[in-house]
Amino acid sequence: MTTHKTPGNWQRFAAKAFFAASATIASCGLFPPQHAAAEDARAKAALMAADSITKEELKELVDVLADDTFEGREAGSRGGQAAGNYLVQRFTELKLQPAGDKGTFYQGFRVSNRNILGMMEGSDEKLKNEVVILGAHYDHVGYGRPGNSYGPFGLIHNGADDNASGVAGLLEVAEGLNLLPERPKRSILFALWDAEEAGLIGSRYWLSTPTLDLSRVKLKINTDMIGRLRNDKLEVYGSRTAPGLRRLVSEQNQHVGLNIDFTWKMKEDSDHWPFYARSIPTLMFHTGLHDNYHRPSDDTHLLNVEGIREVSRLMTLTLIELANADAAAPFREMSKRESPDVQVQKEQPVRLGPPRFGVSWRIVKDSLAAITAITPASPAAQAGLKVGDQLVSFNGQPVSEEPAMRLQLLAAAGECVFEVKRAGEEMPLAIKVTPAGQPIRVGITWREDDGEPGVMLLTQVVPGSAAEAGGLKLRDRIYSLNGQSFASGNDFSTLLATSEAPLNFLVERTGKLQTVKVEPLPAGRTLQAQ
């Protein structure tokens, strides 16, 4: 990854994930049985390709690339040239087609720099004219000097993580794809960029002097520094550059299980940037910087090779999905105006409304609760409830355990009756209270996002609600409800208001899919806030 610090919809392709969810898709009638069977076979083949990636082969590759023999692989140097020769040999063994200049794997520039380009032609007569690129830079900073190293200078900087790890992952992905019974529909260009450390020069040069028509390129995946996976956390850049990319990656991640940070930052620090600047959808996989970054100590013994394997498996599944998709989505120009600050704004939780009743209590014994607080000017205060009242029943029902009582208060509609015992009163009092706002049956609010069509982002989970009790969380992304998808917030609202309990939400949280079961009170009228 370069030290250059200048700051700077892939549409839903199927109704469901085509991997483990294939049987569910078929049962819902979204695909004919023959199509579902074909999708299932393709899914199994994709998993086989991903699972063919081994720690042993990855370690062998990074050991070679990060060996002193290549003298830090500086672009244009003797070591950089030798590393390029080795990588061309690997491309040849992988049976990739030369995609550089004059029928070779090389694209030369700046006298002695060379990009290395190999093509895997697609299997579909029409879609093979479209291209997905998987790229990684293979150069590093040689012996290190002021401007490209944090020192000490003059020693070989092997760049085991930066970026022998990404190159090894790319080679293993290509090898896995060779095991597929049928190649992906789109063509795949495997690109090893030179002179990335000098300012992304190799990828910029290719875009200014492409070896194929740029209109054919539908998306670029970049892999840079994937060798230091910690706490299973992977950063994925670019999920905003085309609609649906976050969902697509998350659905493939169900077979890997990484904790994914779909960051909105886009920096001019690796080879995803020139494609992004050209309005080409892009993703980048990255496991983060560390203290050995651009130092001689970035060596192979510090790598998490199992982590490289897991990231490479996810890249394999993602690449196959993209290359087989029925259609490619255009670049989202809005992504150029988005940033982590914009992300904070868009994911900002909505403010809680006023309390429906404004009463707090604690259970003192079975079927009896003590009112401990009354919110000033609330419906409870205006109706005459007082701190110290002992609540006997609510709407004729004895007081039950606290969670159930909270659900009843949130979901209550119209005039309600609190039966209370009050000090100084011989008989219980029946105090009528009309709650504020709409009944809250489930306890969530949500927001739509054109970067994630057909997904609802939770912006509020009401404390004490069925949603909170079931385990829904702020910023969860809801994909389906009781197996049914939705196109808009209105569709989701209608589905939520009319579905019977239990409610099974398929949600994505940090790139992982899970089903959250919520058991609200019986469905009532259509609600504005669910």
Image (tube, rainbow, N blue to C red):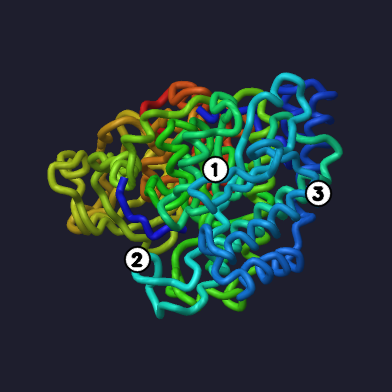
Q: In the image, 132: left or right of 9?
A: right
Residue occupying the point 31% across, 45% down:
8
Q: Which mark is residue 430?
A: none
Query: Is residue 419 in view from this perspective?
Result: no
The first of marks 1 and 2 along the sequence is 2
Distance from disc 1 to disc 2, alpha carbons, whole Å, reads: 45 Å
- 1 and 2 marks in contact (CB < 8 Å): no
The kind of residue tagged 1 is Val
Find residue 172 and report its horizontal and vertical position in percent.
72, 55
The first of marks 3 and 2 along the sequence is 3
Indicate which label's residue lies in the foreground, 3 or 1: 3
Q: Which mark is residue 507?
A: 1
Which sits in the foreground, 233 or 162?
Answer: 162
Indicate which label's residue lies in the foreground, 1 or 2: 2
Q: Which residue is mark 3?
A: 48
Q: Secondary structure at mark 1?
A: strand
The first of marks 3 and 1 along the sequence is 3
Q: Residues within 10 Å of mark 2 (few under 14, many from 20)?
A: few
Q: Which residue is mark 2?
A: 147
Indicate which label's residue lies in the foreground, 3 or 2: 2
Dividing the picture into quadrants, the one containing residue 371 is bottom left
